[in-house]
Amino acid sequence: MEDLAGYKGSSLSFLKKAGASIGDVLEVETSWGVVSGTLVPRYLYGDGDHVVLKLRSGYNVGLDVSVLRSARVLAKGQKPSFSASSPPKPSKGLPRVLIIGTGGTIASRIDYRTGAVHPAVSSADLHSLVPELSGVARVQPEILFNVFSENMRPSHWTKIAQRVRKAIGEGFDGVVITHGTDTLGYTAAALSFALVGVPVPVILVAAQRSSDRPSSDGPINLIAGVSVAGTAGFAGVYVAMHLGESDDKVALHGGTRVRKNHTSRRDAFVSVGVPLAAVWGKSGAEYVSDGLPMRGGSSFAPKTRFEEKVVLMKFYPSMPAGLIKAARKIGAKALVIEGTGLGHVSKEIVRELELFVNGGGLACMTSQCIGGRVDLSVYDTGRDLLHAGVLPLEDMLSETALVKAMWVLGNSRSLGKAKEMMVANIVGETTSRSFPGTPL
Ligand code: DAS
């Protein structure tokens, strides 16, 4: 019964009796008077006791079937659909930018099936939703997959990295990846390692608000991302998201130092312990940090494999040693422990980590403190951890450390080599000293 999508129970029988379909304009007689509006779909988890009409004012009203007497169809409606207009033709001289769609809010619309945000908009639709793109670059949009980013896995990171490598061979001046916000930092870190030495800008963009909301941040993030990808003189992997609550500045964050710090604000993303890589405004670059790798370069050596058997654990008071045992039981090859303060855990956990390392595992320590860095040489606990063979990871973000351990184990032939790579600073994942200027 597609014509009455989502309706069930008594609301479905009432509408069937009236011969109504989704999109029809109905006049409904109720116990307190007559109301008319357009019949809209019910979402999947809605109850069977309400009929929902969109009033002329644009507001939706839910009518309890118990007060409904009768309904008649005033006019047959058009099925609601979204058809993208064809994007304007970009001019020849503009740079070529590939947009790879992977899903998330930036590529979503409200879905009446669930009443929530649903990945639905293709990259091509995105392009027509943001016609300004045609004044910035010759854009080629394509969908690689369409998932909410909480469902991303290392195999997705490999797919994206391989598509970027191919795009460079195809002569694109830069690449933009549209992505969900939840795990954007993980994917940015993964691509930073997998694409070490990448000769063009690779810019991940996302949105905190879906494309059908006036306050959607998708368009400005996408325009800035495409502009950076096509014209920036620097190369590397960055996240481009709102800077502040205004609508005219976008921050570029280095791929291994970026964190989603707020569940809903449009400026949720921050660079931790380092300056912003760049700031982009309506007319292009407003600030570019010193020392970014230049576009071009010949050291591009992609390594796109990831070992999934790595576990990230946040230590907490009374954490049972059994959790480390469980990690070993599921075959974890590396553990990243987010310790307290300078990188500390309880005595029981130190013992378990020593057993894990003696069994050939790679154990690393980060800190739950957002600012500062791990130092295992100050307290007994830290020295016991060093003695147990745990690797301190300076000021590396825990999420970046997890991704790096997956990448290192996926691309090294020995544990010794893996340990060497883990503590080396490869793409700015650790700093020699924390930058005082960032929020944290
Ligand atoms: N579920 C979120 C994600 O895909 C939606 C978003 O913020 O993009 O990361």
Image: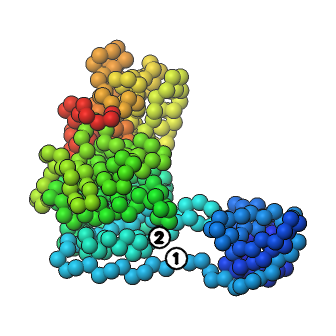
Q: Secondary structure at mark 2?
A: loop
> Closer to the N terminus: mark 2 or mark 1?
1
Q: Which residue is more in the foreground, 325 or 131? A: 131
**Tag shown at residue 82:** 1
User: On the picture, is 407 further left or further right than 337?
Assistant: left
List x then y, in percent, for residue 3: 70, 79
Q: Secondary structure at mark 1?
A: loop
> In 3D space, how far apart are the residues under numbered discs 2 and 1 (Cα atoms)?
9 Å
The N terminus sits in image quarter = bottom right
**Tag shown at residue 121:** 2
| Residue 231, quarter of the rendered image | bottom left
Q: How many marks?
A: 2
| Residue 99, quarter of the rendered image | bottom left
Q: Which residue is more in the foreground, 429 or 182? A: 182
Q: Could you classify mark 1 by the number of other residues whose Cα lies within 10 Å: few (under 14), some (14-19), or many (20 or more)? A: few
Q: Which residue is located at x 52 percent, y 26 percent?
A: 319
List x then y, in percent, for residue 230: 22, 66
The residue sitting at the top extreme is 380
Q: Which residue is located at x 16 percent, y 56 percent?
A: 234
Q: Amino acid at mark 1?
A: Phe
Residue 174 vs 273, above or below: the answer is below
List x then y, in percent, for residue 341: 38, 23
User: Does the CB distance between marks 2 and 1 fall below 8 Å?
Assistant: yes
Q: Which residue is located at x 42 percent, y 74 percent?
A: 125
Q: Could you classify mark 2 by the number of other residues whose Cα lies within 10 Å: few (under 14), some (14-19), or many (20 or more)? A: many
User: On the picture, is 317 further left or further right than 42?
Assistant: left
Q: Which residue is more in the foreground, 206 or 58? A: 58
Q: Which residue is more in the foreground, 189 or 129? A: 129
Q: Nearer the viewer, mark 2 or mark 1?
A: 1
List x then y, in percent, for residue 284: 22, 59
